[in-house]
Image (cartoon, rainbow, N blue to C red):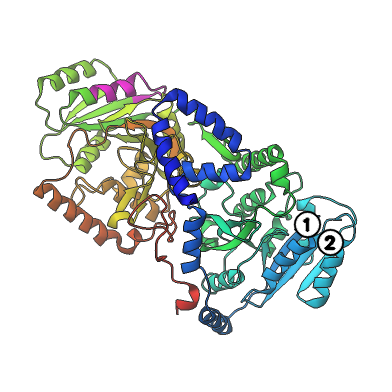
Amino acid sequence: MASLLRTLSVHALKAVRRVPLAHRLVHAVAERMAETRWGARYIRSVLEPAALSYGEYLAWVARYDTLSDADRAAIRAHVRRMAKKPRISVVMPVYTASPELIGEAIASVQAQLYPNWELCIADDASPGEAVWAALQKHAAADARIKVVRRAVNGNICAATNTALELATGEFVALMDHDDILPERALYEVAALLQDHPDADLIYSDEDKIDARGRRYEPHFKAAWNPELILAQNYVSHLGVYRRSLLSAVGGLREGFEGSQDFDLALRVSERTTPQHIHHIPWVLYHWRQEGGPETFSQAYMDRCADAARRAVAEHLARIGQTRVEVENQADAPGWIEVRRAPPEPKPRVSVIVPTRDRADLLARCAEGVLSGTDYGPLELIVVDNGSVEPQTAALFEQLRTDPRVRVLPAPGPFNYSALNNLAAAEATGEVLVLLNNDIEVTDAGWLSALVAQAVRPNVGAAGARLLFPDGRVQHAGVVVGVGGAAGHLGYGQPGDTGGYYKHLKTARNVTAVTAACLAIRKAVWDEVGGLDADRLAVAFNDVDLCLKLRARGYDVVWTPHAELVHHESATRGDDRSPAEQARFDAELAALRDRWGKALDDDPFYSPLFDRSRSDHHLASPPRRTPPWQAG
């Protein structure tokens, strides 16, 4: 029934969006509903096409995330074979939770299939004696459980730090007093450490659990993403840290209650490198949302949101990233929005637009660049690939009256890579922007947002948020491996929704961005040799470029702060002729020949998602082999 209701609501919302007055009324009602837990969960399921209903997720869990006795025996056998069995200290602050919920949390640790753990609990001076008596009883029954009672109540940071003082393990796992660890959780951490003993920070996927013990709202995460972590604390649960690093940063910082683990993850990331941060793509933590007293973050949302904003702002200041504005997102205060500004003086930008006739498209694109953009200095290089229509010739003459415009003749068969390479060689800008002639500028700040990302030393290329004329998403980053090669994330989804955990409206590291609008420093372009005009004349040249950049250690960033409209392929039409299909197949083969397995596993798109689509739909079966079966 819940799944049917959600489906009907999704279709109804599509109709409502076409009527502005009705949309405003529905939005007002939704805002009131969102103030309740059930309402917020229902609204998210409607707004995010990839969200799973209770039933859908529970069916997936029953089929793929329920251990058998044979699985447990294989896990225990794997543990016996492990060359090293590092101790993991589970650290748990406790305050005023019911002894029953605390008991369930403790029992989930005791049920771990990996035996080398200790549980370090600090009671933050809970009123009365019930909590402390229960903790003492648990400690007396299991020598691996250590408890301490604080003399005065502090806060979650102070209590966690007190519990940390009890820890002796090489690694520390943070756990709340009413949450649940699945029995494989610490085993999965230990299994990862067999291959990556130098790991400093490990995090897993997570979901939520209700008062009846039912799991819902899973968060399937991706590899370490330095841009995304500025918007949301996706490390969260289960977070496991090298204890020496926790000591080095001084534990949790008081004053950041409610976002203390966000602040911790950012500070620890400054003491290590991405190569030492690892993600386990499986749900290893069940976050209780109902059935107990409100958590600090639920009761004091404004303070938590401010703590998150301060954590990000201070992190950026410590790592020397200036000219940034850090604010809470208006529609989701717990999320952070980082807006970057280009340096001063602003670098010169060369905007490259290949074209063949279609003067109507080019005129609109050029007008947007020259008059609808608030950035300067810039030049517009129009690459004429054999235009023959009188209207186009007249437009060229008109454009040439602007000293910022050059028209480069480039007759011959269409070769997108060659056209851009030609223009890049002639460009005078420090930053190149590849731009399709069917792009429409709708926001004057688009180029500033792109340049602000592209000039960062670690960034190789930056891409924009592109929408279809009807407002649907055309491009929010490229996922490799989708459809056999690559696909656009969120393609065709409503542009007014955030998508899966707001990824369609949040700046992120991605594997690739489309060359329909791509910014890159000219020096970096030259370093990697530009686009491949020999083997990738039309398709996949942008994916290849971005993979070359990443192979050189550069990041690729997608930003929603550069938003434009893309009248996709309006010039050339669809590739449907036999000759075009043969060319496409040859270029796909060339891409696969060059990058091989790198196309199969996008680090920024969970291996648990279906590779036949790019909308965060769960794969069935999962593409991940559990470690006890990996040999």
Q: Position of residue 30 (x, y in %)?
A: 55, 34
Q: Name the residue under label 1.
A: 97
- In this rendering, the answer to whether 584 lies above or below 403 is below
What amino acid type should be assigned to the residue bearing mark 1? Answer: Ala
Q: Name the residue under label 2.
A: 131
**Left or right for 526, reference 21:** left
Q: Does the magenta stretch include residue 481?
A: no
| Residue 628 circle label | none
**Left or right for 355, reference 512:** left
Out of 15 and 371, give the one closest to the viewer.
15
In terms of secondary structure, where does tag 2 sit?
helix
- Which of pointers 1 and 2 lies earlier in the amino acid sequence? 1
Q: Does the magenta stretch include residue 377?
A: yes
Image quarter of the C terminus = bottom left
Q: Which residue is drawn at 30% across and 63% down?
A: 596
- In this rendering, the answer to whether 167 lies above or below 346 is below
What amino acid type should be assigned to the residue bearing mark 2? Answer: Val
In terms of secondary structure, where does tag 1 sit?
loop
- Pointer 1 with pointer 2, Cβ within 8 A: yes
Span colored in magenta: 362-378
